[in-house]
Structure formats: structure tokens, C-alpha cells
Image (tube, helix red, strand yellow):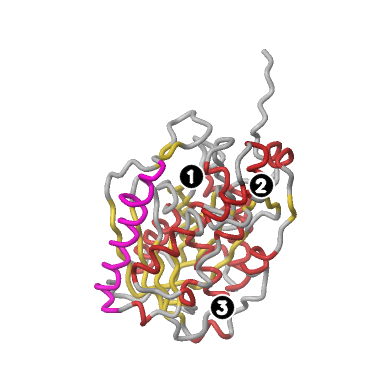
Amino acid sequence: MMEQTVGIVSYGAYVPRYRITPQEIGQVWGTDGAAMGKGLNVVRKSVPSPDEDTITISTEALRIALTRGRINPHDIGAIYVGSESHPYAVKPTATVVAQAVGATPYLTAADFEFACKAGTAAIQTCMGMVASRMITYGVAIGADTSQGAPGDALEYSASAGGAALVIGRENLIAEINATESFTTDTPDFWRREGQRYPSHGGRFTGEPAYFRHVGECGRRMMELAQTEPKDYQHVVFHQPNGKFPQRIGKSLGFSEAQMKYGLVTPWIGNTYSGAALIGLANVLDHAKGGDRVLVVGYGSGAGSDAFDVTVTDRIESYDRNHGRQVQEFLDGGVPLSYAMYAKYRGKIHLGGS
């Protein structure tokens, strides 16, 4: 439990504009894309344009957050970008983002990696630094442009998007009451250096990986916070697809109404490190002062981070209308053919010496 109140001062989200449906993917590989989409509960997924990557997505999300919160970039003491698709193997994403928003040079910056929970790990780090008064504001970003191998199940859900949270002590739109983590060595998903696409353990990624970690972490968080599911107006789970969060939510005792705004994957796909943060951003777009939120992220490898959050009355005067709200990303999008999708995602490799 936190001895000193810290929380979210501002937030922003960004999702690329292009979309592709499971049906479009399935007809190329001779499979029933509609059935695959229904099984995953994914209607369509986002696709980044050729000039978009984790850096541009992170920068756009953070610019929205800084403007909404009227935050001077020079007051930022730390920027951490969580992703599993950093553009460079050696060259930080965080420094480029910091320079782009005018936060350099007096801050610390680093890239985080822990599959899909790198963004929530960044939140915890910022919480500690802010609470200890090492910094005034810390920025935690979760963003990804991951993709699956052609024809693989991941190709139907792996998408792109991200969100940025500014963590501080004052002018909070949401207080983070407590955080908890549950971590083990569970090899459910991996990609070795030099491999183009990730590998996964199929059904193994469900029971011993996602459901165990999210379930145990969520239960432990409620024990520490001395809460029950009925005490929360909203709940956000990591969402590798649209079915897993619904199943774990039901098993923990949450209703569809409580999961409504936190579930975004069916309309934009699995944004990996951005999934839980975009879900939280959508909740904050709709929340009222006094609403309580449970957030449980997940990252393969494997671990979960959970947060007990209370929205403050300040949310009512906070400028949620600057920049696009998450619902606009869920409703919008420009459709792509598989050919253009393959071109944009670099799936076509030309031979030659």
C-alpha cells in the first residue's frame, strides 16, 4: 500500500487509423476468418502506416496528455516507455520521445521490456520516484506495433496503439491507492534476438499463464485494498483478445457493465503494452468523481501488475475533450486490403544480392 498519495495527473492515447478485419486475413490463408474473429472476439484490428512506430505513437499520446494537463515538459523528471516493439535494438525510444515533447535534458529516461506489462511496470516505477519526491512528474507509456507471423493466430489480433500517463502528487484526476504484482517464470510467449515474429505456447498461454497470473494478482489486490468486486464501477484487464478479459472478469465476480469501458481489443486488436493503458484511458474518458477502478495488466514470461484506483472530483473539470477520446479510435478507422496491410507491415521481402 502507498503511504503517500500519488496518482494520475493526466493521460492521452493514440491508435493508428488503418484497420483490417479477420475476414480479410482469413480469405488469404484459406481459413474461416469470421469464425476466428468470433472465437477471439476481435472485429478488426489497427494497423500502423509505414511512417508510424512505437516512438511516434508514444509521442502523440504524451503530447495529448501534456496539453490536457497543462503540464510544462521541463517539470517531467522521468520518461519510461514500455514496449516489445522498440524501433531500435540499441538506441532508446524514451530519449526520442523526451526530445520530441521538449522534456530534455534534465530528466532520466529508459525503455522497459516485459512483454505486454512493460507499461504497467513503468507506472509502478514512476509511482516510487514521485512518492519519494525524487521527481515532480513521471511519465509511463505503454505502446506497441507488434505483429504475428503470416497465417498465425496472432496475425488476427496483434495490432498497434499506446497510451501515456503522467504520474504526480498534486492536481490528481485519479489516486492510485495501492499496487500489487504476481510474477513467475512461465514461458508462454517469446521472441529470440533476430527473430522476425514471436512464438507462443498455444493453449498453454491461457490457463497456466494469463488466467493464473491475472486471477491471482487481481484477488491479492482486492485483499490488500479490502475490497470486493461490487466496490468497483470499472475494471480493466490486459486483453490479448476480446475473450480472455471477459472470462477472467466473470470468474472474479465482475459484471459486463463493469468491464464495458475497459474492454477495447474487439475494435482495435491487441495493442500489447498499450492494451491495459488504453483500456484505462477509455475508463477515464467516461468516469465520474468517486468511481473506483481495478486495473490488472499482464505480460508473458510471466507477470501481472494490479492497481486500485479512485477517480477524483477533479476529473469533472479536466480537459478530456482535447485530442481524440478513445471511443473515437474504437469507432473510426480506414479499412485495408491484405495486400496493403502486408506492404505496410513489411511482410513482403524482396530477394537479391
Camera-side residue: 61 or 280? 280
Marks 2/1: CA–CA distance: 15 Å
Identify residue for label 3: 286
* Extent of the magenta region: 202-227
Marks 3/1: CA–CA distance: 29 Å
266 on left or right of 181? right
The picture places residue 212, in percent across and down from the top left corner, at 30, 56
Q: Is residue 79 visible?
A: yes
Residue at image point 45% right, 65% down: 246
| The C terminus: image quadrant | top right
Identify residue for label 2: 52
The picture places residue 178, in percent across and down from the top left corner, at 32, 71
Give the crowd class for mark 3: few <14, some 14-19, many >=20 residues within 10 Å. few
The picture places residue 186, in percent across and down from the top left corner, at 30, 44
Residue 64 picture quarter? bottom right
Q: Which disc number belongs to residue 20?
A: none
Q: Which disc number belongs to residue 84?
A: 1
